[in-house]
């Protein structure tokens, strides 16, 4: 076996780290100075020094290939150090895995930092025998304040808030030239301003990146157009705007705000398909039969104008009433979407139906209510047409007219089959609650089997737990130039094309498709660059999701901070030897009931059945059980909620 390899390291505050050996499920443990200054999620070159085929091996970091980030959010606190018999200033990072105690070059120039959250920037660190030298880049504000915590959630992941004056100026220049640009584009783009066209979005949406058009054809079929905002026309490769978009790679959706990928003059104005405004778009136009068969398709640049802006609820009201604005178009599209969804599921798409929540905030952004998001049919309808466009664009690029692979470089949204060990864990959980899953000898679970499990527990107390457990067994979807299909959707071809305002891979897909439509070849040598951009986009997507979840945890901690002592009904979603993790049935908030807060008994953990049993009482706790809990306390700083049994 090769003794050196490159991978991403995960470090711990205990001055150690782990790197997964490529193409295996084994890890190399690295400790002490053998970390060679590696920090959490850095890309490193590792040498295996002790190989243990039956478990974790040992090794050392040879080189830092790429730093994951150079900024770290946290606080400076006075901590008692026994060896010095005194309190010393220590940097406590927000993120996990930060082990060094940095030398802060300018700590005294920022005044009293007690109770404040700061951003440290790594200046230099090449010698593992000495602590890193860092400087204070920014003082975010008071710990626990909304603005401080929202910024921290983004910045600590190496992501950027706001745009430089130069980028804003470039966006304003594009806007100033827009009227003249529009005139010159009429001549070369397909004019679809005569089509009945509308957008359907959330009531609080600020940018509209897709519109649908409808036309009944003489042969009885329908022309359905999916028209997507075209920021790739304005954001040219290698420009300041492009560099800024690539650096971010995605918009970030925090509880109280959106951190956009593009300046708002583009995302909310020029590129947004606002009603009654002529816009430049990239369109996928399909001729469809009554049974949702695509018999013809066209892809290209267009000029469009939206006639009407629906909210999801507005469109749903028209469908429910059987009359109203654009009823015929909505009714036909609803029927086509229903058929497309049925076919999709029959072909292996997984029907996860998780409940999402929304926070109702007061004027000071304090959460005053947590409510489940309503899932309307019109949301599913829009989703089906976006899936159609994404799938057909991907197929168009990937397959020649004769049905053979085109081998044209492209960016795909891929989703691999679940790993056997993850499937085994899910199967063990299902068995513990009395359900046998059908898994083949290779440890593979068919998507249709997952649907069978979900359907069998639809509406039951266990539905949410089972759905979450199966979701955790899934691989994460990602971007790649290698098309392996999309397991979760059951699609052989799939790319992201429909949200270029908020996702860089969609911007890439537009650019590549434009080149192919113009007859231009994309050299295979470009594939390496496209793959690098795909990997970067995947990494930034993960960081954005982490920031979004961090903002949700913060709002939950705020919400429950004045509810200490309140009782609630919860479901156990995980059992460990330390206690039980529960989820409030009403708000979907989660937290821990430690064994210390489970009454005067000694609890023993059974790993096989994943249960805790009281030695004296005999009471058993298992995943899926319903318990009454009481809010024991909250820690807004750590974004934690602690519960105790109320029984």
Image (cartoon, grey):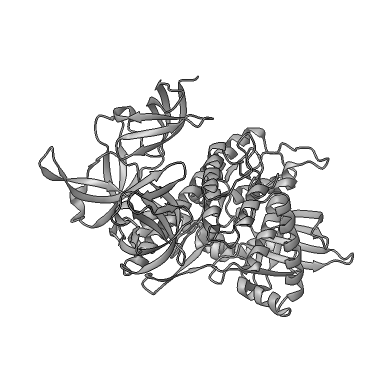
**Residue nearest the observer in this picture, 588 or 23:** 588
Q: Is residue 44 above or below residue 188?
A: above
Residue 475: percent from left, percent from top: 56, 43
Q: Residue at x 69, y 61 (%)?
A: 227
Q: Residue at x 79, y 41 (%)?
A: 400
**Residue nearest the observer in this picture, 103 or 483:** 483
Residue at far left of view: 85
Residue 86: percent from left, percent from top: 11, 44
Q: Is residue 481 above or below residue 57?
A: below
The quadrant where residue 301 appears: bottom right
The quadrant where residue 174 appears: bottom right
Residue 13: percent from left, percent from top: 30, 40
Answer with left or right where residue 271 lies relative to residue 71: right
Image quadrant occupied by the C terminus: bottom left
The quadrant where residue 307 appears: bottom right
Q: Is residue 11 visible?
A: yes
Residue at far right of view: 219
Q: How many marks?
A: 0
**Residue nearest the observer in this picture, 376 or 178:** 376
Q: Is residue 164 above or below residue 402?
A: below
**Residue nearest the observer in this picture, 104 or 609:** 609
Q: Is residue 518 visible?
A: no
Residue 120: percent from left, percent from top: 30, 47
């Amino acid at each position: 076996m090769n003794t050196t390899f490159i991978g991403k390291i995960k470090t711990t505050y205990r001055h150690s780290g782990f790197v997964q050996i490529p193409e295996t499920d084994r890890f190399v443990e690295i400790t002490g100075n053998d970390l060679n200054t590696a920090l959490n999620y850095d890309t490193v070159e590792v040498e295996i020094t002790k190989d243990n085929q039956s478990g974790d091996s040992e090794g050392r970091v040879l080189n830092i290939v790429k730093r994951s980030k150079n900024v770290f959010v946290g606080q400076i606190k006075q901590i008692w150090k026994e060896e010095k018999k005194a309190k010393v200033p220590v940097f406590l990072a927000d993120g996990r895995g930060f082990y060094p105690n940095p030398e802060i070059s300018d700590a005294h120039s920022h005044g009293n930092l007690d109770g404040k959250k700061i951003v440290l920037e790594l200046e230099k660190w090449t010698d593992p025998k000495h602590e890193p030298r860092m400087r204070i880049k920014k003082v975010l504000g008071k710990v626990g304040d909304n603005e401080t915590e929202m910024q921290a959630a983004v910045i600590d992941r190496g992501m950027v808030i706001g745009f430089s004056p130069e980028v804003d100026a470039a966006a304003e220049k594009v806007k100033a030239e827009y009227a003249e640009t529009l005139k010159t584009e009429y001549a070369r783009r397909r004019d679809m301003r005569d089509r009945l066209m509308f957008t359907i979005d959330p009531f609080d949406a600020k940018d509209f990146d897709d519109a649908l058009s409808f036309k009944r054809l003489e042969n009885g079929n329908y022309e359905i157009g999916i028209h997507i905002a075209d920021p790739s026309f304005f954001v040219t490769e290698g420009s300041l705007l492009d560099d800024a978009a690539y650096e971010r790679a995605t918009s970030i959706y925090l509880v109280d705000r959106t951190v956009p990928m593009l300046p708002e003059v583009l995302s909310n104005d020029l590129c947004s398909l606002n009603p009654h405004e002529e816009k430049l778009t990239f369109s996928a136009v399909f001729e469809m039969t009554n049974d949702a068969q695509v018999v013809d398709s066209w892809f290209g640049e267009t000029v469009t104008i939206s006639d009407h802006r629906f909210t999801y609820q507005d469109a749903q009201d028209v469908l429910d009433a059987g009359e109203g604005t654009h009823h015929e178009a909505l009714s036909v599209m609803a029927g086509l979407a229903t058929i497309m969804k049925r076919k999709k599921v029959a072909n292996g798409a997984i029907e996860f139906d998780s409940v999402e929540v929304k926070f109702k905030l007061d004027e000071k952004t304090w959460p005053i209510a947590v409510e489940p998001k309503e899932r309307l049919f019109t949301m599913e309808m829009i989703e089906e047409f976006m899936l159609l466009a994404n799938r057909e664009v991907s197929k168009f690029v990937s397959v020649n007219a004769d049905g053979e692979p085109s081998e044209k470089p492209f960016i795909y949204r891929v989703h691999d089959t679940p790993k056997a060990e993850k499937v085994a864990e899910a199967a063990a959980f299902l068995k513990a609650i009395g359900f046998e899953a059908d898994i083949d000898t290779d440890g593979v679970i068919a998507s249709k089997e997952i649907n069978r499990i979900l359907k069998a527990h639809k509406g039951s107390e266990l539905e949410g737990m089972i759905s979450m457990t199966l979701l955790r067994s899934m691989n994460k979807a990602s971007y790649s130039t290698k098309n392996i299909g999309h397991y979760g959707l059951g699609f052989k071809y799939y790319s992201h094309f429909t949200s270029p305002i908020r996702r860089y891979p969609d911007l890439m897909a537009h650019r590549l498709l434009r080149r192919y439509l113009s007859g231009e070849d994309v050299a295979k040598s470009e594939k390496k660059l496209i793959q690098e951009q795909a990997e970067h986009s995947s990494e930034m997507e993960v960081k954005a999701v982490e920031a979004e979840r961090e903002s949700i945890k913060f709002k939950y901690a705020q919400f429950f901070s004045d509810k200490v002592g309140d009782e609630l009904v919860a479901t156990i979603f995980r059992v460990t030897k330390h206690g039980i993790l529960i989820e409030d049935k009403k708000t979907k908030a989660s937290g821990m009931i430690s064994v210390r807060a489970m009454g005067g008994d000694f609890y023993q953990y059974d790993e096989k059945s994943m249960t805790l049993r009281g030695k004296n009482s005999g009471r058993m706790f298992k995943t899926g059980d319903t318990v009454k809990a009481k809010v024991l306390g909250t820690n807004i700083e750590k974004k934690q909620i602690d519960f105790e049994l109320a029984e």
